[in-house]
């Protein structure tokens, strides 16, 4: 029997029974694997870390997208950094008012492999509003000013190719690249295992340094370490819960499997131990 | 190297590195194991299923206890069914207004082993308000009427010794055993993997049959399958969010690592796919 095993920590393993390996390649940046599994459908792994499965990717992609889109009443120009699998772009294309989606993915092969093996996730990359830039997000953002309503940082973990997307310089440049009512949402690691919690604290500290409003919200992602995952919500103007016109979002009639407005509000209510980890690095 | 591995489904394994096995015994009802681990501290397993770890048991025990205790303004008599490890009792003993805690655990050896190997979890079993009955909860509750303010069903999964605690007869008898403003909270399985979701639906259908108010709330429990776990909140009178005096609870100054009032409210906001699974069995 073939098992894909990820070490969530040196002491914890999560294993998925694999029917077969569909693809494997060492790209310029990382190792890319695609597996077929009975439990989760297709599985994408980068450098041996599980990035998404067809069974639960809707949770990650809905929650990174619809939370800020519900808060921002008229987002038209959106930048996605990372996210070469196309899942975040797919959710964005559900909004008719969005005019322009720029995707900056360092590794063109991730986009190509996703189009080939993960069509349900990658399909919307063909939407005419989408432009793909195969560049380092850290470099791309340096020369952008007052350009976007929304930046979604759909990154890997803070080592390897994704490392630059967790730096103070990067967050500062995202602030500069946003309009005066802009929002940045980022993949924010997890509070439970020690190393993930440290990465979460470090990111929060740096984002607080750049943005006046910086909150964190939580989701259940069963295939990520501990299943308890966080997103960061950093904003120039809008509070993620108090400044929301819920009715306006409902009238868009966007179909979701995970996201809804009460869940959006509830996801910003964090356990005490998480609040304490965050407070420890504020100011 | 020694690893404790639980099959979350036939296709998914979760493994914890074990320093050593501290205890193993086949009791009259089940196999009981205690392990020492670096990542999670001590681990209790029944029939090979992970019941609790010292690292994350606070989440389960706080959330099964403080949610109903915050809703019920003056609970004095509480029945815990299952829960031989003592964690739920520990949380209950934080309330001075509780006068009587009855614990009905089918397997006396679970209580004895927990007292021996899990002192942080089991300590409050010595509280003078606690009486332990070593009986089948299903039989115990049959002859009880109008006796409790709160029943916490801290059961194992719906097979083996815990099976009777998921039956229509059991929920009906819990209703009868409660005062006119009583609340029952139960371990309600998980929505993510197919078999767990089926158990969740079946329990919800049966509870709806007995109680006028039946809601479900969610928590992050990293060591349980998918990490996405549910509790059922079944009530004769009080709604779990609308009928709560949050200020009164805060004034009790009970220290928690996970639970807080906004999180309590937020935990009843469920993902669409979970709401749909529940609605499918309501009528």
Image (cartoon, coloured by chain):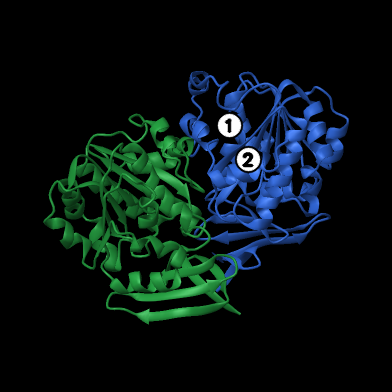
Chain colours: A blue, B green
Percent position of residue A148, x then y: 75, 25
Q: In the figure, is residue B210 to the left or right of A14?
A: left
Number of numbered markers: 2
In this orientation, which residue lies closer to the viewer: B125 or A260?
B125
In this orientation, which residue lies closer to the viewer: A239 or B276?
A239
Q: Is residue A120 visible?
A: no
Residue at x 26% of width, y 49% of height:
B99
Q: Describe the element under mark 1 as helix, strand or loop.
A: helix
* Chain ID at mark 1: A
Quadrant in which the N terminus of chain A appears: bottom right
Q: Which residue is mark 2?
A: A231
Label 2 CA crowd tier, 10 Å (few <14, some 14–19, many 20+): many
Task: Answer with mark 2 or mark 1, whichever residue precedes in sequence.
Answer: 1
- Answer yes or no: do the residues labelled 2 and 1 have beta carbons within 8 Å? yes
In this orientation, which residue lies closer to the viewer: B9 or B158?
B158
Per the model, the C-alpha gap separating discs 2 and 1 is 10 Å
Up the image or down, A272 lies above or below A5; here it is above
In this orientation, which residue lies closer to the viewer: A106 or B110?
B110
Q: Determine which quarter of the picture holds residue B15.
A: bottom right
Percent position of residue B56, x then y: 51, 58
Q: Which residue is mark 1?
A: A67
């Amino acid at each position: 029997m073939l098992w894909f095993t990820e070490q969530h920590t040196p002491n914890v393993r999560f294993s998925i029974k694999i029917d077969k390996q569909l693809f494997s390649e060492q790209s310029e940046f990382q190792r890319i694997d695609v597996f077929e599994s009975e439990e989760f459908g297709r599985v994408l792994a980068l450098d041996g870390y599980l990035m998404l499965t067809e069974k639960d990717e809707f949770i990650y992609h809905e929650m990174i997208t619809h939370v800020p889109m519900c808060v921002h009443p008229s987002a038209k120009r959106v930048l996605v950094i990372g996210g070469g699998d196309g899942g975040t772009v797919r959710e964005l294309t559900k909004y008719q008012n969005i005019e322009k989606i720029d995707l900056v993915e360092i590794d063109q092969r991730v986009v190509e492999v996703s189009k080939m093996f993960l069509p349900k996730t990658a399909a919307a990359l063909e939407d005419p509003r989408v432009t793909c830039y195969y560049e380092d997000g850290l470099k791309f953002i340096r020369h952008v000013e007052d350009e976007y309503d929304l930046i979604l940082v759909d990154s890997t973990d803070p080592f390897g190719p994704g490392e630059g997307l967790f730096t103070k310089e990067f967050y500062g440049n995202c602030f500069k690249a946003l309009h005066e009512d802009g929002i940045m949402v980022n993949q924010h690691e997890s509070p439970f295992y020690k190393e993930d919690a440290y990465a979460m604290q470090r990111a929060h500290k740096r984002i607080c340094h750049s943005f006046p409003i910086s909150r964190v919200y939580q989701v259940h992602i069963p295939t990520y370490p501990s299943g308890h995952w966080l997103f960061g919500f950093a904003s120039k103007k809008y509070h993620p819960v108090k400044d929301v016109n819920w009715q306006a979002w409902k009238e868009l009639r966007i179909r979701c499997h995970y996201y809804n407005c009460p869940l959006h509000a509830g996801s910003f209510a964090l356990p005490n131990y998480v609040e304490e980890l965050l407070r420890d690095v504020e100011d």
